[in-house]
Image: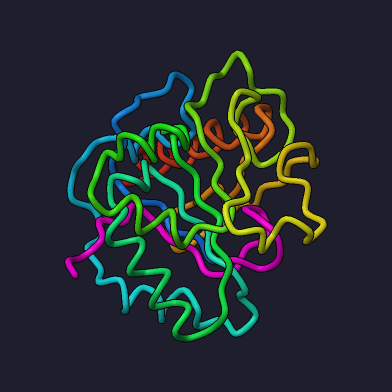
Amino acid sequence: MGALNVAASWVGTTALGPGRRSVVWVQGCPFHCAGCMSPDWIPDVPARSVKPAALAAELLADPGVEGLTFSGGEPMRQAAGLAELIRAARRIRDTTLVCFSGYTLRHLRTRPPTPGVPDLLDEVDVLIDGLYVAALDDGRGLRGSGNQRVHHLSGRLADCGYDFAGRDRSAEIAVDGREALLIGVPPPALLTVFDAAVDHVRQSSIGGRA
């Protein structure tokens, strides 16, 4: 199996699904949704190259992690590698999988954009599908906007008590060296504040080097 092109990853969060999870954001997305919270991850350019088995071990290094979440970018553009990643993770530990996609489930099943899509769908417990539409962002749930749908493909998380569609949103800000990562589907006001803070730090850093 070839390497994944990963924009970012994080071990241990409660902001992107039930329980304690690790997250992978892949690089590259074909949709260019207006208001996307991760515009730097849209271009299809080389980022971090990592083999699925190595990434699985990294994501499950925290023994408290009980699930993975795939986002991006667009996960279905790297479906084969992500399918191998979750299979490798499940060889280490019983692990649930939440996956986001801008494609609808119907599109993925009838016109898969890459050959590995059926394999990845076979592994997904919860799929959150559909394009982000800023005008329909109601600030609720793990969906980015109200047009997106939550599909329980396996039933494993159907009775876990986590309200994917209607819960109060939460987000975490993780700092790793000089990099800051916003984890979760934030309320719109938080995203604005986060972007302003990052811009301020970048400008201060540029000024300090002059």
The residue depicted at 32 percent of the width and 69 percent of the height is 84
Query: Is 59 within the magenta?
Result: no
The residue depicted at 66 percent of the width and 34 percent of the height is 190
Q: Position of residue 163 (x, y in %)?
A: 78, 47
Residue 41's place in the image compared with 98, above or below, is: above
Q: Residue furthest front?
A: 110
Residue 14's place in the image compared with 44, above or below, is: below
Q: Position of residue 27 (x, y in %)?
A: 30, 47
Stretch in magenta: 1-21
Residue 157's place in the image compared with 143, above or below, is: below
Query: Is 17 within the magenta?
Result: yes
Disc count in the image? 0
Q: Closer to the camera, 208 or 59? A: 59
**In screen coordinates, is 82 left or right of 9?**
left
The residue depicted at 44 percent of the width and 59 percent of the height is 122
The C terminus sits in image quarter: top left
Q: Position of residue 53 (x, y in %)?
A: 32, 78
Q: Closer to the camera, 136 or 116? A: 116
**In screen coordinates, is 184 left or right of 71?**
right
Residue 105's place in the image compared with 65, above or below, is: above
The residue depicted at 42 percent of the width and 23 percent of the height is 33
The N terminus sits in image quarter: bottom left
Q: Position of residue 205 (x, y in %)?
A: 39, 44
